[in-house]
Amino acid sequence: MEMQSWAFMLFVVVSAALYWSVVPAKLRPHYLLAVSLGYYFSCSIVFGVFLLLYLYGIFVLGILIDTAQTKRGRKWWLIFGILVAIGILFLFKARTGLTQIVFMLLGMGEGKAAALLVEKFGIPLGISYFSFRAVHYLVEVYRGKNLRATPLEFFLYVAFFPTLVAGPIHRFFTIGKEKPEDSFGDQLRTAGGLRKPTADDISIGIWRILQGVVKKFVIADFFLKLAGPMMTKQGLAPTVGTLELWAAGYFWFFYLYADFSGYSDLAIGMARLFGIRVMENFRWPLLASNVRDFWRRWHISLTNWLMHYVYFPLGGSRKGEARTNINSLLTLIAIALWHKLALGMFFWGVYHGVGMIVFRYYMRAKNRLMPDRKPTWYGKVIGVVIVHTFFNISWPMFHHPMHIAVLYYFKMFPFIPKLFPLLRQLLGS
């Protein structure tokens, strides 16, 4: 039952109507958990069983972290818990390549066929999202600033169906500068059970769902048709010119935003129908005038998560310039590999990490040379165009295997192939 199906929409409407009219306040968390697990099992019984086992395992690890008698014991249980959560995510993401390697090491020649079979088996819905929710929970329990969740609270937090498949990566505990009312745990722990949705909740929820539907099924589909050459090998056909390929890249950016933010709007709207607030995930990122501003606006729940659990633990900007640059680079690589474990995605992360570092030096030089210069509207427009072009250059690495991406770059920058004869002459001389 996919989110874009009529069956799913009917499922949401019926579930919400029963939630408003029939379910007692104290039973609302139980009802939402039953609905969420029912949805997941309807997608896959096998992965539904996997999700239950996964949640039980992570919850037990949270207990072991919280009840360990020594700080060292708490730390080791935390490390083990993170390795379990991220390790399972890694195994599923890298399942095809790992299968081929195992068969090769065993001297068996059927590795490629086995890898294709494993690939066909699929991956648990939303594993990238609920793995990061699990790590958030374990880390915050380790820090000891919050009460450990009950089994019901934890299972519902991770498996809450509006956000399970495509985010946002909401928090159980409030961290950073998030609004307290956006904490999932605080909302579950209100006196008397989950509050009944108000008229505002329902109207806002319906409005956000409508926004998501228009973005996902109208705007995104429109730009998907225009971005076709960038998304398939069709872009390498002789009939597709360089300018057409560049235009497709710009259209792909609009498609990606409309599609992904549309999913987030649907999730936020559906959650609001049940009276639950979920953090915002996008703040008009296509209007960002520099790369730093872009990452503050795009997939906010993921970038905030990585700031708190990767960038800051590595030292953030507190350990000197070199470490700051390395930390920025590693954080952007983590963003890339979270999407997909592939060589092209690794270089995509490196590209954006270097872009962030270059922007930091640019701003330092600009503030030193022109300290009193104020932003202008035309400067912001130029900045938006630069950001879009910067991302346009990276799309082949994001969407294609690296050997295909290289061919795209030869076509996007037709002068590159012409450099090779010149290089051979220089080397020969």
Image: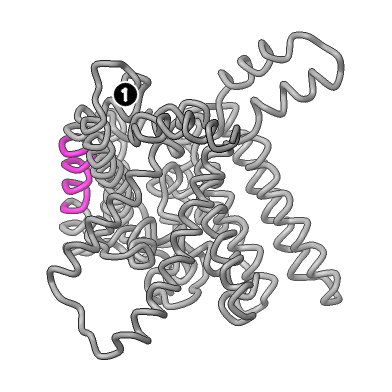
Q: Secondary structure at mark 1?
A: helix
Who's the residue at 52% across and 41% down the image?
A: 345
Residue closest to the far left: 377
Q: Is the residue 123 above or below the residue 61 in the image?
A: above
Quadrant of residue 198 within the rendered picture: bottom left
- The answer to whether 62 appears left or right of 121 in the picture is right
Q: Is residue 69 above or below residue 90?
A: below
Horizontal side of 298 relative to 353 (left or right) equals left
Q: Main secondary structure of the magenta part?
A: helix
Q: Residue at x 67, y 77 (%)?
A: 144
- Taking the magenta stretch, the answer to whether it contains residue 57 is no
Q: Is residue 423 visible from the viewing direction of this image? A: yes
In this picture, residue 316 sits left or right of residue 21: right
Q: Is residue 42 visible?
A: no
The residue shown at (35%, 21%) is 236
Instruction: From the image, tell me which residue sits under label 1.
Output: 235
Question: Front-most of 223 and 217?
Answer: 223
Q: Residue furthest front?
A: 429
Return the residue nearer the eye: 16 or 425: 425
Residue 239: x and y in percent read 24, 16
Q: Which segment did they paint magenta?
A: 207-220
Q: Quarter of the image holding residue 138?
A: bottom right
The quarter of the picture where the C terminus appears is top right
> Closer to the camera, 348 or 66?
348
Residue 278's x, y, as percent?
Answer: 36, 61
Where residue 291 sits: x, y (%)? Answer: 36, 62
- The amino acid marked with disc number 1 is Gly
Which quadrant is the N terminus positioned in? top left
Label 1 crowding class (10 Å Cα cut-off): few <14, some 14-19, many 20+?
Answer: many
Counting from the top left corner in percent of width and height, residue 298 is at 35, 57
Asked if the stretch drawn in magenta spans residue 208, the answer is yes
Quadrant for residue 180, please give it.
bottom left
